[in-house]
Every structure is written in structure tokens, then in C-alpha cells.
Image (cartoon, rainbow, N blue to C red):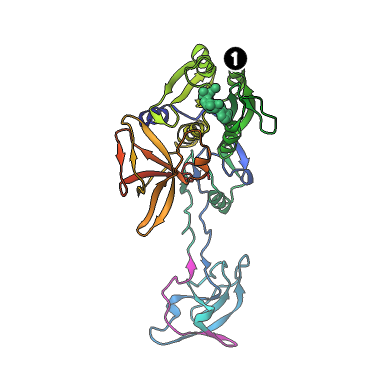
């Protein structure tokens, strides 16, 4: 599995152009050029508190300092119109430009004010309660790299810089389809032996968290012609064709065969559980991703493989989930040679969190995912885990699905 991920990481490159979007629409999009600050933030030295500004050098070396009150005041958005001479102080409000002649602000709580003077009880360090121009961001500073998926807090910084729009990658166009004669659209009555199409709804919801647009191609029947026609049509007009089901070598598994026949299949079996059949390919100019039909496998393969691939194709840097190493609160014996991704909860123990497996790990049990907080990823070489052994825990937050 690690080798497959490495291979994808090396091969996948952004395949979409760029566009400019208003800042209010940029959250979740991928930055297409480094964000260089066009100005310093703050733009000017300003008061961090309400109080009185003065020159630190006006303070007496020992004992309280009495400063004459300079006329006027400086408020946020209303700078003082006169300078403050040595030995004087001017009233300032938070966010006001520090008046000329001043470098320090005493908080209201630190001074005694009377009609025409303020008295400082102690000695303030020069620069106290002053926010310096450029202390947050310097002019010309490179802030965010191209490939960053913009989160709400990045939008705040861009707004602070006065940027009304950002250059982002165009949304990747994803065609989404399910395959299987047994599948029925939720809301309709089930035929004998039928099941509802869980994957397409789950995948659509997962894709909503990525910078893509999704076209829903519905459910494909298990017929070579139907699958071929739909996949070829989808590939001609989309950047990615994401399918679930029909991705192995069974009689009615037409997805892989279509990609093989008309495009290039990159690999299709991965030594991992759940999710062995996983097909990446190229068809026309599109990347095809064939997920297993089994909903747990489809979800896990999407989170571990398809999500970083789709995000990368959409311009983002490779999204590798960070693993927390936590002690196991379970016993496991497994076969060597394959990676296992086990659904697990984090339980608060006395020494910190530990990973507890969800009891029912069956790959057909979709609620094992909704009961879990993430996945414990067990390396191929590991054959046994005992309580207290360190394990790699990938939280669903890191995997981008909560
Ligand atoms: P397949 O990969 O097509 O062999 O399907 C493997 C298993 O997953 C079968 O039990 C299918 O019925 C089931 N399955 C396939 N697609 C879906 C889907 N979209 N929603 C729910 N279950 C599915
Ligand atoms: Mg099938």
C-alpha cells in the first residue's frame, strides 16, 4: 500500500487551469500562486490598548512621572493631527496610529488622570503596548504557498492584506458513478436481492469537501456496453471519473476492463484490507479511479487514496494524513504481507488517549465507520499487536471527513 501511495504521490500533478475568484468564494479552493503580501500588517505603529501615548524617554528614572496632557486624541481610524512634545502624553484608543513623538502607551489602568495631566505610577519599557508596523506580516513576505487548500483562517489573513480576490485552481470536474445490477436509488422500492446505493451518496458528500464539481452519472447496470458507454462519455468531459463497484476481475466487473481496453490501467490490486481491488487509470485525458463496491472498502480507499489524488489533481499539495502514535487497547493477530486499516475509537485513558477497535470490523458493516473516530493503520510486516503496543492512528479529521 505504501508503495502504491508513493507511486501516486510522484505521478499525480495538477491538471486544471487557474482562475480568479472573489475572496468570499475562495474558502476550500486551492491557491494557484504563492500569496505575497503587498503591504505590511499592521500598516502603522498602533496602540494595543486604550490609554495614553508618550515618549518613553520622558519618564523619570525613578518614581512616578507626571506628563502634561497634549490636546486632542488618537482613535482607531482617526489619527492625531498634532505631534506630542517630550514631557507630554496624548489619549489614545486601541488601534489608533501612535501619535508622532510617542513610542509607548500606558494603559488607562496604569495611570492617574486629572484635568490636565496623567501620572504614571511605574516605569514602562519603551514600546510597551505598541504594535509595530509589519510585526504580523512584512511587505513582500511570502505567506502561503501555491497548492494550499484555503481554510477559513487563511481567508482572514488575505482580507487583512486587502486582497479582494485570489488566484486559485479551477475546480476539478469529477464524474461519479456506481455500478451494479443490485443497486437502487434511495427512496425507491427495492427489487428482490436489491440494495440501496450507499456509495454514490457517501462519495458525493466526501467530494463536497474537496475543490471539485461533481456530475452524478447515477447507477450503471452490469453490462459491458452500458459501463463502457458511460465511462467513455464521462472521461471525455471530465478530469476524473470516480466509480465504485465492478473494479475487480469478476464476470460482471466491467469498469476495469473498459479502462484496460480504451486507456491505460495503472494498477488494480493493492495488498490492503479493506479494499483490495482499486483501479487507477487514464482514459482520454481523464484519470479514472475505480473504488471497490463494498461500502467500507469504498470509503477507506477513497480516504486513503482517492482523496489525496483528487486534491493533487486539483492543484493541492499531496494531503498525507498525520498519524498519531497511540497505545493499542486491543489484541490483533493478522497475516503478514498486507496493510490493514482497522476502524477504531480513541479512548481517554489515565496516561492519554489509546486506540480501541470497533468490535465489528466486517467490511460490509458501514456503521463500523460511523462508530469510529479514525483508522488504525497496521503495516504489512506486523503480525501481532498486544495492548500497549504503539499503533498509527489516522483520525477522520486528518483524513478530511469530519
Ligand atoms: P463489487 O465490487 O461490484 O463486486 O461489489 C462488492 C460488494 O459491494 C457487493 O456486495 C455489492 O453489492 C456492494 N456494492 C457495490 N456497489 C455498492 C454501492 N454503490 N452501494 C452499496 N453497496 C455496493
Ligand atoms: Mg458489482
Extreme residue toward the right, this view: 188
Residue 171, above or below 46: above
Residue 178, above or below 142: above
Is the CB–ligand 2 distance for label 1 below 8 Å?
Answer: no
Q: Position of residue 382 (x, y in %)?
A: 30, 36
* Mark 1 neighbour class, 10 Å CA radius: few under 14, some 14 to 19, many 20 or more: some
Left/right placement of residue 352 relative to residue 300 reads: left
Look at the image and say whether residue 115 sits in the magenta stretch.
yes
Q: Position of residue 370 (x, y in %)?
A: 53, 43
Q: In the depicted view, which residue is nearer to us: 156 or 252? A: 252
Q: Give the magenta-colored segment's residue range.
A: 112-131
**Mark 1 element type:** loop
Left/right placement of residue 75 relative to residue 388 reads: right
- Magenta stretch, main secondary structure, is loop
In the figure, residue 167 lies in which quadrant? top right
Look at the image and say whether residue 180 sits in the magenta stretch.
no
- Residue annotated with mark 1: 223
Amino acid at each position: 500500500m505504501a508503495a502504491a501511495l508513493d507511486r501516486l504521490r510522484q505521478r499525480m500533478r495538477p491538471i486544471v487551469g487557474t482562475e480568479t475568484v472573489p475572496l468570499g468564494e475562495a474558502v476550500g479552493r486551492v491557491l494557484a500562486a504563492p500569496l505575497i503580501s503587498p503591504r505590511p500588517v499592521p500598516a502603522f505603529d498602533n496602540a494595543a490598548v486604550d490609554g495614553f501615548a508618550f515618549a518613553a524617554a520622558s519618564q523619570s528614572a525613578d518614581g512616578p512621572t507626571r506628563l502634561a496632557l497634549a490636546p486632542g486624541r488618537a482613535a482607531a481610524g482617526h489619527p492625531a493631527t498634532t505631534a506630542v512634545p517630550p514631557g507630554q502624553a496624548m489619549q489614545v484608543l486601541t488601534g489608533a496610529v501612535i501619535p508622532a513623538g510617542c513610542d509607548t502607551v500606558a494603559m488607562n489602568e496604569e495611570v492617574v488622570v486629572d484635568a490636565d495631566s496623567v501620572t504614571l505610577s511605574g516605569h514602562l519599557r519603551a514600546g510597551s503596548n505598541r504594535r509595530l508596523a509589519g510585526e504580523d506580516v512584512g511587505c513582500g513576505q511570502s505567506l502561503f504557498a501555491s497548492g494550499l487548500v484555503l481554510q477559513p483562517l487563511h481567508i482572514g489573513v488575505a482580507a487583512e492584506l486587502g486582497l479582494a480576490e485570489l488566484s486559485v485552481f479551477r475546480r476539478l470536474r469529477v464524474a461519479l458513478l456506481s455500478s451494479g445490477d443490485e443497486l437502487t436509488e434511495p427512496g425507491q422500492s427495492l427489487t428482490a436481492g436489491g440494495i440501496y446505493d450507499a456509495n454514490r451518496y457517501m462519495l458525493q458528500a466526501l467530494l463536497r469537501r474537496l475543490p471539485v464539481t461533481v456530475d452524478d452519472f447515477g447507477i450503471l447496470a452490469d453490462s459491458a456496453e452500458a459501463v463502457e458507454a458511460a465511462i467513455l462519455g464521462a472521461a471525455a468531459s471530465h478530469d476524473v471519473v470516480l466509480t465504485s463497484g465492478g473494479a475487480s476481475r469478476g464476470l460482471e466487473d466491467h469498469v476495469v476492463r473498459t479502462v484496460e481496453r480504451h486507456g491505460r490501467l495503472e494498477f488494480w490490486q493493492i495488498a490492503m484490507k479493506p479494499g483490495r481491488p482499486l483501479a487507477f487509470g487514464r482514459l482520454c485525458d481523464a484519470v479514472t479511479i475505480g473504488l471497490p463496491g463494498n461500502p467500507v472498502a469504498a470509503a477507506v480507499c477513497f480516504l486513503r487514496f482517492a482523496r489525496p489524488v483528487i486534491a493533487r489533481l486539483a492543484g493541492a499539495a499531496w494531503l498525507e494524513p498525520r498519524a498519531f502514535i497511540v497505545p493499542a487497547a486491543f489484541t490483533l493477530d493478522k497475516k503478514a504481507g498486507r496493510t490493514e486499516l482497522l476502524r477504531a475509537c480513541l479512548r481517554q485513558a489515565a496516561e492519554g488517549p489509546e486506540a480501541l477497535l470497533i468490535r465489528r470490523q466486517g467490511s460490509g458493516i458501514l456503521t463500523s465507520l460511523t462508530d469510529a473516530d479514525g483508522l488504525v493503520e497496521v503495516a504489512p510486516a506486523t503480525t501481532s499487536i498486544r495492548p500497549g503496543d504503539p499503533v498509527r492512528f489516522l483520525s477522520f479529521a486528518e483524513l478530511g471527513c469530519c
